[in-house]
């Protein structure tokens, strides 16, 4: 189907089903139950799953295939966000021009940064991209964001947003005063109540979900293409590439630009979710987060980045919400002294301590699971499958022995 | 006029003169060996031919065109393929994929952004790669991880990858270094077969005299950065200067 | 002329910090072959050693003075620092005043222990892993260290004063024959520069004149050969890592009065220090020091009003611009050697 083989079609269908049915899948617990806090079917969170999924899919095309570790992808995310908000300011709140421009501008940006950074490889490449991203952050935060100057591209600390005085030349009176898709507001939702369950279907989420599916499809096609094979060859042996008559730099640059455009797309979508673009999106911790999502899920695998992004964003949401009260609820069954000891320990990792958990997770994954969750899962699967096959084998053997 | 003409090539590294006034002509369809003691400049010369190094002075012409100043991939596209001392293959890829990549390079050139076509649809490439694997006697290993093969098989694959590009000149840098006797003999047989069945010129840098004398039609002896003598294997064997500079040393 | 001297002076203190961090980074690069993204966090922990020292010295107990009453009419409670009670008010007060320099005594053992634990517990397992993995795992560690400090010290910067004796500024211009109040320079920054110079000198002397240093230098030039000589490289690696951690920590502790310590200062300095290392030339110790001062001074010049009025915001990006240009024109950096950190 659509130029995919059987296995990839299945994968694609799984992703499509997950994306389209997310409001159900992520809300397994009835409202008001103690477990409801683990639900994730809110429009806001679901949109973030999809958007960061797109970002990680794009990052994986660069890092997973070529092995070039960029520490500057947040710059493209930020550039995409700013571009989209500018479209809202100049044209209208319709999200389509914003999304298109965010991809184009991020693409141009990544051509420039990629062209320079890719002249070096390995650690030098990482540091160059990091330097570019920090430079972009500084530019966005202060230099190009001085509200009193004539050239205020980013509106500095406050963040770029739409004001009543903005031209919005294409705005129509009937369209809502929030980001919308041909009149359908991004934040409009339909709620479905089934028994004590409540499912929310949000327009913004479904836009992101459809784009996520498209992004995933394109990434599958790239992985299975001769171009994708060349990128894996770059990672494997550049020397052999060169002596096989292949020019590696255009290949890596193309991968860099494609992944930069994915990041721009994700940035544009973030702006459709909330039309306020701030410089903090470009900070290098944000770049680090993308890296983490990709390696956590499994760099170089198709599904890994989506899994990683969902995992991180879900636990970020859940962990940050847990406070002392919740902990007391959980560990109330323990004897008093033990309860406070356990809470004292756990407290460090939840709520504002989420970043600590994130850092530890980072270290644990890199140390013990370099292939990421997807590869770990495959490993486990093979181990279990292999075991059962062996058991079966043993069974047939014992059965055949008496017969002889 | 040979297919490869090296004229007055000099190369210095700081105070060390690695190559001085090297002149070399490799005749088309011949097997030409370059031998010499360690530090004679064999590798430096080879690197000057493939674009890894640029000589300080002199010229290197391949089929009437200068290779100087061109990047390795450009020189390869001109028709020179190189086999490395330690096999350079794509270890993370399968044997079949390894073989397909040079086929793509031959068909599409140095860069082609074919990101949305599927590999399985590239019938001509697949056919070509399979054919080459059959020639190399490796078709049963097609789905193997290239890195997990034996050294002899890696060498065989690398040579196959080079041949699939139909180069006019094949450069081999000590192709049997570090190999067991059986693997060495297999490689010699393979190279003999290539020489007999293909329209190709082979230049080989080698330490192992057994390999050199079983393959070469012409031999150039390099010593201290310049060619000492060039002749047929029979004459080289008895040449007093060579015995003194090279064979004498190892005897 | 006076403006130039002033900017050079202004660049020295930041340059000193860059140089000290970059020195440690380079030592770790060169000897262990590890890219340590947690090195900035070590600098930050050093700065918090100064904060901790200040807090330790100002630990106090309360006594009730029945003769006085506070504004509510209750007997006045008086806080007395333990050190003042133990050593007498004069000595105690000056100990509190000298908290930052005294924190060196705390920082050295703390940093050596952290360095030891880090190397044995984590870094050791990454010697043979790809650079990407090293970057990622130390990046994770940096986040962890940063969050721990944030948890205990809060998110806000903590002002940590220099001793009263160094609080003013020195009129440097008058000394050189300029008008008064043209070139003034805070005393503590002079102290910091001198301190950095001493540390840098000590590290170089250590590497130059001790057998240990000789082996380390040989190891930086050619790791494999030194390993083949049968010298126990592992133990030396641990010591080198501890040393680099201590240098970063001392740099941080003494920097506390210049820049009130906050939990993310390490990250800010780390990115710049990496740039410094790259500009200086990966694996070159003199390169790291030279580039540290060079970039510090350049940054100071870029923040002059005269320059900012022509190129607004140039101070924010100058270091990155310079790094990008240098990396493209001299890929090995200013003093880099061939073959270091190249694949």
Image: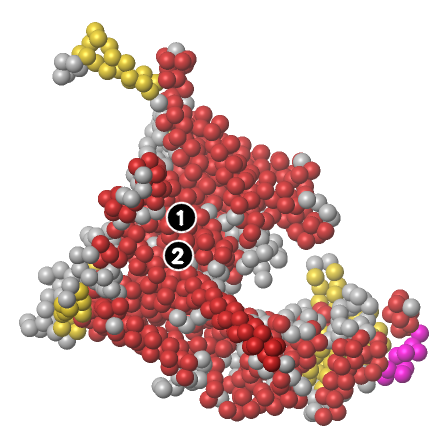
Q: Which residue lies furthest to the top in this view?
A: C67
Of all residues shown, which one is farthest toward the left? A173
Q: Are the numbered discs 1 and 2 placed on the same chain, yes or no? A: no
Q: Please give the name of the residue rendered at 62% of the width and 72% of the height, measured from the top-left corner.
A: B148
Horizontal and vertical percent position of residue C149: 37, 40
Q: Residue A101: in sight, yes or no?
A: no
Taking the image as drawn, is residue A54 in sight?
yes
Q: In which quarter of the image is residue A38?
A: bottom left
Residue A248, x across and y down, in percent: 52, 73
| Residue found at x 23% / y 72% | A207
Q: Do the residues bearing badges 1 and 2 touch, measured as CB atoms within 8 Å?
A: yes
> Which residue, given by chain and number where applicable, does mark 2 sit on?
A288
Q: Which chain is indicated by disc 2?
A: A
Q: Residue A353, image x and y in percent?
A: 33, 46
Main SS category, magenta section: helix
Q: Residue C143 carries which label?
A: 1
**Quarter of the image containing the C terminus of chain C?**
bottom right
Residue B219 at x, y percent in the picture: 82, 80
- Write the start and end of the magenta stretch as one range: B232-240
Judging depth in this view, the residue of A11 and A226 nearest the camera is A11
Q: Nearer the viewer, residue C253 or B241?
A: C253
Relative to C338, residue C9 above or below: above
Task: Say which element carries label 2.
Answer: helix
């Amino acid at each position: 189907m659509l130029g995919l083989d059987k296995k990839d079609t299945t994968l694609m269908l799984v992703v499509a089903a997950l994306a389209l049915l997310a409001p159900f899948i992520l809300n397994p617990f009835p409202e008001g139950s103690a477990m409801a806090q683990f639900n994730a079917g809110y429009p806001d969170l679901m949109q973030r799953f999809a958007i960061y999924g797109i970002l990680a899919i794009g990052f994986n095309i660069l890092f997973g295939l070529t092995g070039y570790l960029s520490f500057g992808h947040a710059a493209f995310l930020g550039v995409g966000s700013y571009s989209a908000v500018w479209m809202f300011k100049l044209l209208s709140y319709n999200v389509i021009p914003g999304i298109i421009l965010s991809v184009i501008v991020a693409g141009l940006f990544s051509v420039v940064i990629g062209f320079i950074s890719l002249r070096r490889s390995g650690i030098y490449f990482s540091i160059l991209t990091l330097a570019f991203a920090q430079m972009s952050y500084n530019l966005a935060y202060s230099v190009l964001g001085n509200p009193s100057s004539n050239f205020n591209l980013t509106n500095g600390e406050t963040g770029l947003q739409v004001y009543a005085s903005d031209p919005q030349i294409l705005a129509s009176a009937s369209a809502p005063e929030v980001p919308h898709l041909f009149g359908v507001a991004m934040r409009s939702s339909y709620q479905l109540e089934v028994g004590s369950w409540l499912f929310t279907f949000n327009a913004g989420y479904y836009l992101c979900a459809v784009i996520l599916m498209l992004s995933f499809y394109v990434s599958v096609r790239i992985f299975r293409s001769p171009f994708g094979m060349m990128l894996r060859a770059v990672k494997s042996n550049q020397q052999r590439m060169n002596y096989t008559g292949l020019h590696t730099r255009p290949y890596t640059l193309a991968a860099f630009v494609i992944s930069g455009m994915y990041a721009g797309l994700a940035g544009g979508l973030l702006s459709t979710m909330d039309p306020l673009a701030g410089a903090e999106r470009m900070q290098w911790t944000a770049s680090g987060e993308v890296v983490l999502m990709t390696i956590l899920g499994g760099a170089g695998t198709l599904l890994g980045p989506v899994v990683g992004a969902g995992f991180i964003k879900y636990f970020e949401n859940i962990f940050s919400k847990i406070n002392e009260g919740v902990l007391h609820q959980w560990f109330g069954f323990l004897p008093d002294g033990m309860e406070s000891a356990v809470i004292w320990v756990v407290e460090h990792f939840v709520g504002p301590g989420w970043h600590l958990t994130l850092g530890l997770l980072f270290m644990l994954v890199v140390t013990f699971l370099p292939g990421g969750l997807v590869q770990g899962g495959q490993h486990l699967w093979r181990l279990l499958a292999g075991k059962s096959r062996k058991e079966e084998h043993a069974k047939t053997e014992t059965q055949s022995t008496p017969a002889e | 006029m040979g297919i490869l003409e090296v004229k007055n090539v000099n190369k210095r590294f700081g105070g060390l003169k690695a190559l001085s006034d090297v002149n070399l002509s490799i005749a088309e369809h011949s097997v030409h060996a370059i031998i010499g003691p360690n530090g004679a400049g064999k590798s430096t010369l080879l690197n000057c031919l493939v674009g890894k190094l640029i000589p300080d002075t002199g010229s290197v012409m391949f089929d009437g065109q200068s290779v100087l100043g061109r990047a390795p991939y450009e020189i390869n596209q001109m028709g020179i393929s190189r086999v490395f001392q330690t096999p350079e293959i794509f270890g993370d890829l399968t044997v079949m994929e390894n073989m397909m990549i040079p086929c793509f390079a031959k068909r599409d050139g140095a860069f082609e952004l074919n990101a949305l076509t599927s590999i399985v649809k590239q019938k001509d490439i697949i056919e070509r790669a399979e054919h080459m694997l059959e020639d190399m006697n490796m078709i049963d290993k097609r789905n193997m991880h290239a890195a997990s093969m034996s050294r002899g098989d890696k060498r065989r694959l690398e040579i196959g990858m080079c041949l699939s590009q139909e180069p006019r000149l094949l450069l081999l840098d000590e192709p049997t270094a570090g190999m067991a006797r059986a693997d060495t003999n297999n490689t010699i047989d393979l190279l003999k077969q290539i020489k007999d069945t293909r329209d190709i010129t082979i230049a080989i840098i080698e330490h192992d005299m057994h390999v050199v004398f079983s393959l070469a039609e012409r031999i150039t002896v390099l010593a201290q950065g310049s060619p000492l003598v060039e002749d047929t294997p029979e004459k080289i064997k008895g040449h007093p200067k060579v015995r003194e500079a090279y064979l004498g040393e190892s005897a | 002329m006076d403006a130039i001297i002033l900017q050079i002076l202004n660049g020295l203190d930041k340059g000193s910090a860059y140089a000290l961090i970059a020195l440690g980074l380079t030592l770790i690069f060169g000897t262990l072959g590890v890219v340590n993204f947690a090195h900035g966090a070590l600098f930050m922990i050093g700065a918090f050693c100064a904060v901790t020292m200040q807090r330790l010295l100002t630990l106090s107990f309360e006594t009730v003075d029945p003769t006085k009453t506070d504004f509510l009419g209750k007997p006045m409670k008086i806080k007395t620092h333990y050190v003042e009670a133990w050593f007498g008010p004069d000595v105690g007060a000056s100990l509190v005043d000298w908290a930052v320099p005294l924190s060196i005594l705390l920082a050295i053992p703390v940093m050596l222990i952290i360095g030891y634990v880090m190397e044995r517990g984590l870094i050791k397992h990454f010697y043979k892993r790809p650079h990407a993995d090293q970057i990622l795992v130390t990046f994770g560690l940096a986040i962890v260290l940063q969050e721990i400090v944030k948890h205990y010290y809060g998110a806000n910067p903590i002002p940590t004063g220099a001793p009263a004796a160094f609080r003013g500024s020195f009129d440097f211009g008058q000394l050189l024959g300029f008008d008064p109040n043209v070139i003034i320079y805070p005393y503590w920054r002079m102290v910091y520069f001198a301190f950095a110079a001493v540390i840098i000198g000590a590290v170089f002397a250590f590497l130059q004149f001790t057998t240990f240093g000789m082996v380390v230098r040989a190891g930086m030039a050619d790791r494999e050969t030194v390993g083949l000589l049968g010298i126990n490289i592992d133990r030396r690696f641990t010591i080198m890592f501890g040393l680099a951690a201590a240098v970063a920590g001392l740099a941080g502790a003494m920097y506390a009065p210049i820049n009130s310590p906050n939990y993310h200062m390490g990250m800010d300095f780390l990115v710049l220090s990496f740039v410094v290392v790259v500009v200086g030339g990966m694996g070159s110790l003199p390169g790291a020091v030279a580039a540290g001062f060079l970039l510090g001074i350049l940054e100071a010049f870029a923040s002059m009003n005269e320059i900012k009025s022509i190129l607004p915001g140039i101070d924010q990006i100058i270091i990155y611009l310079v790094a990008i240009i240098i990396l493209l024109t001299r890929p090995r950096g200013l003093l880099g050697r061939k073959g270091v950190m190249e694949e």
